[in-house]
Image (spheres, rainbow, N blue to C red):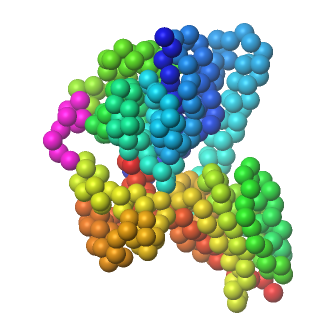
Amino acid sequence: MLSQVLVVDDHPLFREGICRLLERDPRLSVVGEVGSAAEALSIARTRAVDLAIIDLVLPIGSGGGVTLTQRLKQAQPRCRVLGLSVHDDPTHVAAMLRAGADGFAFKTQMGAEILDAIQTVLGAKRYLPPAIDAGQVMRLATSREATPLERLTQREREVFELLVAGESNEGVAARLFIARRTVETHRQNIMKKLEVSSIAELVRLSFQLGA
Amino acid sequence: MSDLDQLLHELLTPLSTLLLWEEILRTTDEPVRQAEAIAAIRASAQLQARLIGDMRELDRARRGALELAPTRVAADELVSAAIARRREPVRATLARDAWLHADAPRLGRALDRLLEPPGELALELAVDGEHVVVALRGAPFAPAIGHAFARAIVELHGGTLSGTGTSAVEIRLPRST
């Protein structure tokens, strides 16, 4: 039976290249190729996905790779996730694993290696690139220390995402049906927990964390 | 992720795309796929060259070594040309009779970078006293090389660019009478 694969990457040329690569493996079928977390979740609401290949850094506004991985796993727990990025920082790889990703590959790896990563993950095994210190990644992924985003409460996370998407305090209040002063309090707490002092820094951090 | 990581991310993205398509080109016999791969490789190389060009100009601007070649320019023509270069449409309101003393090619490139975010964008060109104001609304404008380049070019023209990291960006430039 064909494995249904969803490709999520905001760089169209890279995404198309991955789809061409997938065509070479007769066991795989592309169920969708999209450029944002919102589009990916929209597909996941209507179609069964066996594997999602998710870029760590996605456009600001609808959630990055880490957040998408969490939401996709909630929507479809049996869906396997392979994170993909040009970043080789173990912290980012670990963040994807903590979010529920089953493996991670670098975009600069050979196509054959990326196909191998896909089959490894579909086979219910973990894949990490040979060039990364897997021990360090797993230590970070299983650490009890909270990552910056994990320090936020569920409500703070919702406020965070709306602020990053460009909503004003009034806009956030209207969207979440809460008072503007409550939003301001959440906003102050978020800034403090994430150690930033402006919305611009918050957006930058979101981009960096794949949030 | 540090600033260097951010920079590397932008430079490695077209490079990884180029590597991927190079492998596809090398391992296919289909003419259609070959042509597709060659086009993708070229586009990726051009993007990387553009990023490097922006970084070079940014460096020159920060060192005070970038010399502008200003002429009297109609702001609406400059903005219209940038909108026409964008692949996706822009909802634009353009004031007439807004003049700038500007290096049109460089300021045009700065506008191109600000118009890069995908999705729907709204643009308003207006005159506010002694200033020409370009206000953009749309997807959040991410901090990136192109954005830093745009800011540097605007500031070299004696203007300001505000709103990085939000869904609204405003350029204010001295008006030429």
For this orientation, the residue located farthest to the bottom is B129
Q: In the rendered view, would you say A55 is above or below B24? A: below
Residue B85 location, x and y as percent? 78, 53
Q: Decide if residue B174 is on the left or right side of residue A196.
A: right
Residue A143, visible in the rendered structure: yes
Residue B168, quarter of picture: bottom right
Residue A125 location, x and y as percent? 31, 17
Q: Decide if residue B176 is on the left or right side of residue A192.
A: right
Residue B4, visible in the rendered structure: no
Question: Which residue is rendered at x = 23% and y = 26% of the image?
Answer: A135
Q: Nearer the viewer, residue B56 or A64?
A: A64
Question: Which residue is rendered at x = 28% and y = 55% of the image?
Answer: A154
Residue B19, quarter of picture: top right
Residue A161 location, x and y as percent? 40, 57
Residue B155 shown in magenta? no
Quadrant the C terminus of chain B occupies:
bottom right
Q: Nearer the viewer, residue A113 or A75?
A: A75
Residue A209 location, x and y as percent? 37, 48
Question: Which residue is rendered at x = 83% and y = 74% of the image?
Answer: B74
Number of residue marks: 0
Q: In the rendered view, would you say B90 is above or below A129? A: below
Bounds of the magenta segment: A138-146
Q: Nearer the viewer, residue B119 or B114?
A: B119
Question: Which residue is rendered at x = 73% and y = 25% of the image?
Answer: B36
For this orientation, the residue located farthest to the front is A46
Q: Decide if residue B53 is on the left or right side of residue B84.
A: left
Q: In the rendered view, would you say B155 is above or below B177? A: above
Q: Nearer the viewer, residue B106 or A138?
A: A138
